[in-house]
Structure formats: structure tokens, C-alpha cells
Image (cartoon, rainbow, N blue to C red):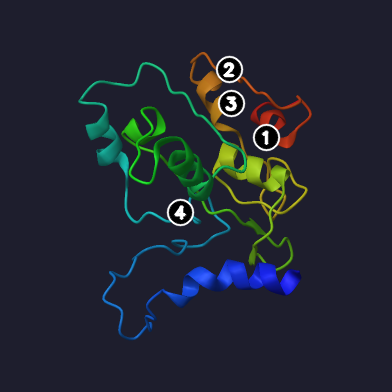
């Protein structure tokens, strides 16, 4: 049974062309690796250069009145594409997420506390720290970098600047992602 399932899973590959890395003409994706020191704020970014002008242009020369950050915990391009293909077909378009002027992604790894090297299996605490502070951390840590230095969240910075802030979550309050936005 397992052999039959494996054969069925690999069957589409029989009709696929073989492309060697040396002969492919597909454009090389540049700047896909983390830029700079991955242990510092912004060091794990995949986009090169300052994105301020792209953001400014998307606002059509008007300041943003509100900023809403939607986090689909565990949701990446693959999940969005699968949902889009299922709901709208391969050439489909989601009126919501596909129409946004800017969407962002961040590298999904945490850091090893001792070596500072990537740990490719991250947990919610390290992920929440990266989302809320812009600083990579190690698994099991909330709000600190690999040197255990505390970092403020973007909501704390906004509140200190006199802005109104909020946090709406479908997760339990003690879940790492909503918990990290505020200090308890």
C-alpha cells in the first residue's frame, strides 16, 4: 500500500522536464538571504534597502490614519496560495489580501542562544518576539535578544508616543503571540 501511494505521488514527475541548475534561464532571486548581522534589529530582513519610499508611495502622499497588523500565525505563501487555488482557481484573485499595496514576510527562524546561528525550528515565543520587537531571539524567550537584553514592542513605543493601541486575538491570552505585545 505504501509503495502504491509513493508511486501515485511521484507519477506527475514522470511528465516533468528535467532542468539542471547550470542550464536554467530562470532569474536568480537576489537578496533572499538575511542582510547583515542576524542578531541585531533588522538584521534578518530579506529585502535590501530602505522600504520607506515604497510605503510612502502606497499611501498616496497621505499619512496613515491607522495601522492594522494582521498576523496569520503559521500562514505563509503556501497556505494562501492553496486557499486561493481552492476558492478561486489557479488564476484567481482574493479581493482582500491580493489587493493590499504592501504585504510583508519575515524570516521564520529563531537563533541559537549560545552560537547566534539560525535555529530553523522556531517556537511561538521567539516568533512573537521577532514580530513585536523586530529582534530575533531564541526559543522559549519573550521580548529579549540572545544576550537577554530587553526590547520594547512596537505597541509600547506607539503608546509612549501618545498613540492609541490595541490587541485583538482569537488565541488564548497566555499564548505567546498576543502575550508578547504587552508586558504582564
Q: Nearer the viewer, mark 3 or mark 1?
A: 1
Q: Residue 14 location, x and y as percent?
A: 47, 77
Q: Residue 66 location, x and y as percent?
A: 41, 18
The residue sitting at 75% across, 46% down in the picture is: 141
The residue sitting at 54% across, 17% down in the picture is: 165
Is there a contact, CB below 8 Å, between mark 2 and mark 4? no
Q: Nearer the viewer, mark 3 or mark 2?
A: 2
Tag 4 residue: 45
Above/below status of 48 relative to 30? above
Real-space Cα separation, disc 2 to disc 1, in angstroms: 14 Å
Q: Residue 48 location, x and y as percent?
A: 34, 56
Is there a contact, CB below 8 Å, between mark 4 and mark 3? no
Tell me the tag on residue 177.
1
Q: Residue 40 location, x and y as percent?
A: 54, 54
Real-space Cα separation, disc 2 to disc 4, in angstroms: 26 Å
Tell which circle, 2 or 4, labels the residue nearer the N-terminal end. Answer: 4
| Element marked by disc 4 | loop
Real-space Cα separation, disc 4 to disc 3, in angstroms: 22 Å
Judged left or right of residue 33, residue 108 is: right
Amino acid at each position: 500500500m505504501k509503495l502504491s501511494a509513493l508511486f501515485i505521488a511521484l507519477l506527475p514527475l514522470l511528465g516533468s522536464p528535467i532542468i539542471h541548475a547550470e542550464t536554467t534561464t530562470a532569474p536568480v532571486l537576489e537578496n533572499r538571504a538575511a542582510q547583515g548581522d542576524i542578531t541585531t534589529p533588522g538584521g534578518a530582513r530579506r529585502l535590501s534597502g530602505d522600504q520607506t519610499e515604497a510605503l510612502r508611495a502606497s499611501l498616496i502622499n497621505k499619512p496613515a490614519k491607522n495601522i492594522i497588523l494582521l498576523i496569520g500565525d503559521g500562514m505563509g505563501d503556501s497556505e494562501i496560495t492553496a486557499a486561493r487555488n481552492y476558492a478561486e482557481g489557479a488564476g484567481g484573485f482574493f479581493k482582500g489580501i491580493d489587493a493590499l499595496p504592501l504585504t510583508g514576510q519575515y524570516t521564520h527562524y529563531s537563533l541559537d542562544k549560545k552560537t547566534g546561528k539560525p535555529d530553523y525550528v522556531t517556537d511561538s515565543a521567539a516568533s512573537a518576539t521577532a514580530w513585536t520587537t523586530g529582534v530575533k531571539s531564541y526559543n522559549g524567550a519573550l521580548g529579549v535578544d540572545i544576550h537577554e537584553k530587553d526590547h520594547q514592542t512596537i505597541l509600547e513605543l506607539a503608546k509612549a508616543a501618545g498613540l492609541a493601541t490595541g490587541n485583538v486575538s482569537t488565541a488564548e491570552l497566555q499564548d505567546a503571540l498576543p502575550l508578547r505585545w504587552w508586558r504582564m
